Amino acid sequence: MDKSTAEKRILELRNLIRYHDYLYYVKNAPEITDSEYDKLFSELKHLENQYPELITPDSPTQRVSGEPQKEFKTRQHSIPMISLDNAFEESDVIDFINRIKRFLKKDVDLEFVVEPKIDGVAIELIYEKGILVAGVTRGDGVTGEDVTANVKTIKTVPLMLMTSNPPDLLEVRGEVFLTKQSFKLINEQQEEQGKPPFANPRNASAGSLRQLDPAITAKRPLDAFFYAPGLIRGIDVNTHWDFLQLINSYGLKTNRLIKKVKDIDEIFDYHRYLSEIRDSLPYEIDGVVIKVNSLALQKELGETARSPRWAIAHKFKPRQAITKIKDIIVSVGRTGTLTPVAIFEPVDIAGVTVSRATLHNQDEVDRLDVRVGDYVVVERAGDVIPEV
């Protein structure tokens, strides 16, 4: 095959592979078998090996590339990736909506988008004219680590947007995570290699994403959902909902459980529904994110130094378990601070085995009147930190 013919076939194969990746990873509706897909991929690799000068960074064959890095470079976010305020009770959500109404100082019909709060690692992808040029961790919210080479290994991350009219610039934010099944497999591999298992899927996701060798990240079955814009140029949408539909059409995976709601009752119904089905979901969630749907209102509401005024995370009730106190020890911090720590019989809480929890200080020990041999209720505060 001459070079001109090969170039046309390479472009055709890349488009075919991107299309089938989109159907398989984003839509969960494959049209061809794995063996048929493998044949397309093998043909593309063969032609690119024959004409290496035709290889481009956005080719599906270039997901795993580059030498291990010595350290990650940092990159500043165009718009800070600030965190959300948390709501732990329904009254907190009511207060959130009332604050919005007071701030706007006008009568407006509010519409919200509610979505599962994925328990993963925040990431920002940057596309220039449809090509993925960077993947950056949240970091401190202002500056993150450039993990582009690792992000490229995630099959649900398109290297090139599926559109003939890509925006000049699209910064899109989302969450990298591991499914419960993938987390289990990774920990089995850790144990086989004599390495300590990861405490939870979030830690495993973070550790996988921050590997200096992309080849190691490629072996970890990371997944991703996308849910928010950063800086964008060349996109004209009026609502958050429309933005999600648009990026999904570009090949970026959005969560199918996302829903539009109009009032507080629908918000609470959705929260109860997700709380009931969370154990049956293939990934960990720890609450519901509530966002004002109108992008114009989002802009008008703005943000505080810490969080946006137009969004909040309504967390689930902490998971609990009953166990027996085996010992109470004193931990000495780096500054010499003494902290009592309860050691108890290991219990599984929301998929994580815990065997110790801070008692904070002596006043808390006295208040709880907790002693060795007592049976106590242990919960994961925020679904992360064990607490008696």
Image: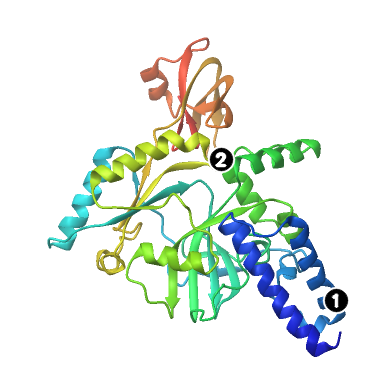
Q: Give the residue at x 27% y 39%.
A: 90
> Which element is circle 2 on?
loop
Quadrant of the image occupied by residue 236: bottom left
* Quadrant the C terminus occupies: top left
Q: Which residue is mark 1?
A: 49
Indicate which disc, 2 or 1, sits on the residue closer to the N terminus.
1
Q: Nearer the viewer, residue 188 or 388?
A: 188
Of discs 2 and 1, which sits in the foreground? 1
Q: Residues within 10 Å of mark 1 (few under 14, many from 20)?
A: few
Callouts 2 and 1 close, C-beta under 8 Å: no
- The numbered dot on residue 334 is 2
Q: Is residue 72 left or right of residue 8?
A: left
On the image, the x and y values in percent for residue 366 come to 39, 18
Identify which amino acid the numbered label 2 is placed on.
Answer: Arg
Identify which amino acid the numbered label 1 is placed on.
Answer: Asn
Q: Is residue 313 left or right of residue 15?
A: left
> Which element is circle 1 on?
helix
Q: Does residue 172 appear anywhere in the picture?
A: no
On the image, the x and y values in percent for residue 359 come to 46, 26
